[in-house]
Image (cartoon, grey):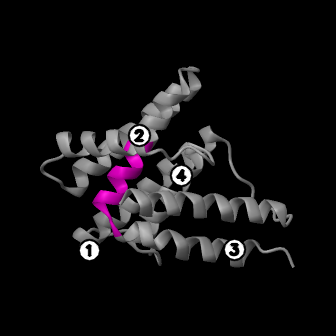
């Protein structure tokens, strides 16, 4: 999983850099704003999961995206928040250890509540100017959490990036 996530992280940054080099208006958000976007994408993914698990709950709007797509969008924003060169095997291994230690009984509700908490913690750490490595660890932990909870989302990132390229390509 580490190599796949590392490749995906590199792909996210390659697309971001190429779009900016080409003069696209697709701007890479700051680390803080990336975390805000990640939180929004996690909420959208969880909303889709709730719709799928209880379709009798009335909602006033339909969604075209899948749970995996929304998780992929969250992964892209988390990988953006990490920075271009920050996906390390040390942080990944620590995150896997935490995942295995804390989550021996996996369910989407618990995993997503942890992801929401992690992103909120990372935002608070950034806003209080605490050490960057702490943010990196919390974000890496969240990436592993989402990748383990929704494995198809890692593969969906490339498809979501292709859509972004198509929408933002400079003519």
Which label sits in the foreground, 4 or 1?
4
Cα separation between marks 1 and 2: 38 Å
Q: Residue at x 69, y 60 (%)?
A: 16
Point out the tag, 4 or 3, that comes first from the N-terminus: 4
Residue 129 visible to the viewer: yes
Q: Which mark is residue 91?
A: 2
- Asked if the stretch drawn in magenta spans residue 146, the answer is yes
Distance from the alpha carbon under mark 3 to that under mark 2: 29 Å
Measure how far apart labels 4 and 1 are at the Cα level: 32 Å
Q: Which residue is mark 1?
A: 55
Q: Which residues are magenta?
A: 140-151
Question: What residue sits 25% from the left and 41% below the top?
Answer: 97
Q: Which corner quadrant of the image does residue 159 belong to?
A: bottom right
Q: Nearer the viewer, mark 3 or mark 2?
A: 2
| Residue nearer the viewer, 136 or 40 | 136
Which is nearer the N-term, disc 4 or disc 2? 4
For residue 79, which numbered disc appears in the image? 4
- Which residue, given by chain and number where applicable, does mark 3 sit on? 165
* Relative depth, front residue between 139 and 14: 14
Task: Rate crowding at label 4 as few (under 14), some (14 to 19) or many (20 or more) other CA atoms within 10 Å.
Answer: many
Does residue 88 show up magenta in the picture? no
């Amino acid at each position: 999983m580490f190599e796949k996530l590392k490749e995906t992280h590199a792909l996210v940054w390659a697309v971001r850099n190429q779009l900016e080099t080409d003069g696209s208006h697709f701007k890479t958000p700051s680390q803080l704003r990336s975390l805000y976007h990640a939180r929004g994408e996690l909420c959208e993914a969880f909303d889709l999961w709730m719709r799928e698990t209880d379709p009798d709950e009335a909602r006033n709007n339909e969604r075209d995206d899948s749970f995996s797509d929304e998780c992929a969008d969250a992964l892209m924003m988390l990988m953006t928040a990490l920075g271009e060169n920050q996906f390390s095997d040390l942080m990944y291994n620590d995150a896997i250890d935490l995942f295995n230690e804390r989550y021996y009984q996996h369910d989407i509700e618990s995993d997503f509540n942890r992801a929401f908490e992690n992103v909120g913690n990372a935002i608070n750490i950034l806003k209080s100017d605490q050490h960057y490595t702490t943010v990196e660890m919390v974000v890496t932990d969240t990436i592993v959490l989402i990748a383990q909870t929704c494995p198809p989302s890692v593969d969906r990132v490339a498809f979501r990036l292709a859509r972004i390229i198509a929408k933002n390509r400079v003519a």
